[in-house]
Image (tube, grey):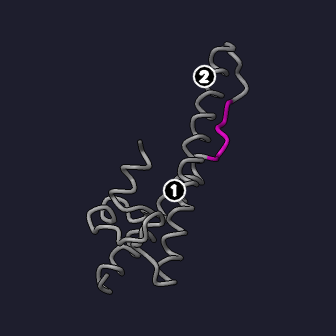
């Protein structure tokens, strides 16, 4: 992979990491439920919403771990290599998801 393309993916990963870190931080804030308890349904809805926020935050954390792995691979000159078959990951796959661990063929076989 040429240096300019590698730098492009690195910059995308760094920007995405910053964005996701901000989102996780905001999603993990405990909402102010207030002290006016009008109904149990309202509290249930607020609690459910917070649970959903935490679930989304967890998904973002998993993606952050993938991004950190990809950035580490860039440092070690191993970026863009499929973890399953060892073949290069195509540019179109990396453009869609620069943190990809697998090539297109291996992604297909993983999803089946």
- The label on residue 63 is 1
Nearest the viewer among 65 and 28 is 65
Q: How far apart, in angstroms, are the residues tagged by discs 1 and 2?
A: 27 Å
Q: Residue at x 58, y 30 (%)?
A: 49
- The label on residue 45 is 2
Q: Position of residue 48 (x, y in %)?
A: 62, 27
Q: Main secondary structure of the magenta part?
A: loop
Q: Residue at x 51, y 84 (%)?
A: 76
Q: Quadrant of residue 111?
A: top left
Q: Is residue 4 above or below residue 56?
A: below
Q: Quadrant of the C terminus?
A: top left
Q: Position of residue 40 (x, y in %)?
A: 69, 14
Left or right, 70 with reference to 95:
right
Q: Position of residue 2 (x, y in %)?
A: 29, 85
Is residue 89 found inside the magenta-colored segment of the image?
Answer: no
Q: Quadrant of residue 80?
A: bottom left
Of all residues shown, which one is farthest toward the left?
A: 92
| Label 2: how many Cα within 10 Å (few below 14, some 14–19, many 20+) | few
| Label 1: how many Cα within 10 Å (few below 14, some 14–19, many 20+) | some
Q: Quadrant of the N terminus?
A: bottom left
Left or right, 31 with reference to 66:
right
Q: Secondary structure at mark 2?
A: helix
Count of numbered circles in the view: 2
Q: Is residue 8 above or below residue 36?
A: below
Going from the N terminus, do you reach mark 1 or mark 2 first?
2
Q: Magenta span covers which residues?
A: 28-33
Nearest the viewer among 19 and 35 is 19
Left or right, 93 with reference to 22:
left
């Amino acid at each position: 992979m040429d240096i300019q393309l590698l730098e492009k993916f690195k910059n995308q990963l760094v920007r995405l990491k910053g964005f996701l870190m901000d989102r996780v931080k905001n999603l993990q804030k405990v909402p102010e439920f207030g002290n006016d308890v009008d109904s149990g349904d309202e509290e249930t809805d607020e609690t459910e919403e917070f649970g959903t926020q935490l679930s989304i935050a967890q998904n973002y954390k998993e993606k952050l771990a993938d991004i950190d792995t990809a950035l580490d691979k860039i440092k070690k000159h191993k970026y863009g290599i499929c973890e399953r078959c060892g073949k290069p990951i195509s540019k179109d796959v990396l453009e869609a998801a620069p943190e990809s661990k697998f090539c297109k063929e291996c992604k297909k076989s993983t999803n089946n």
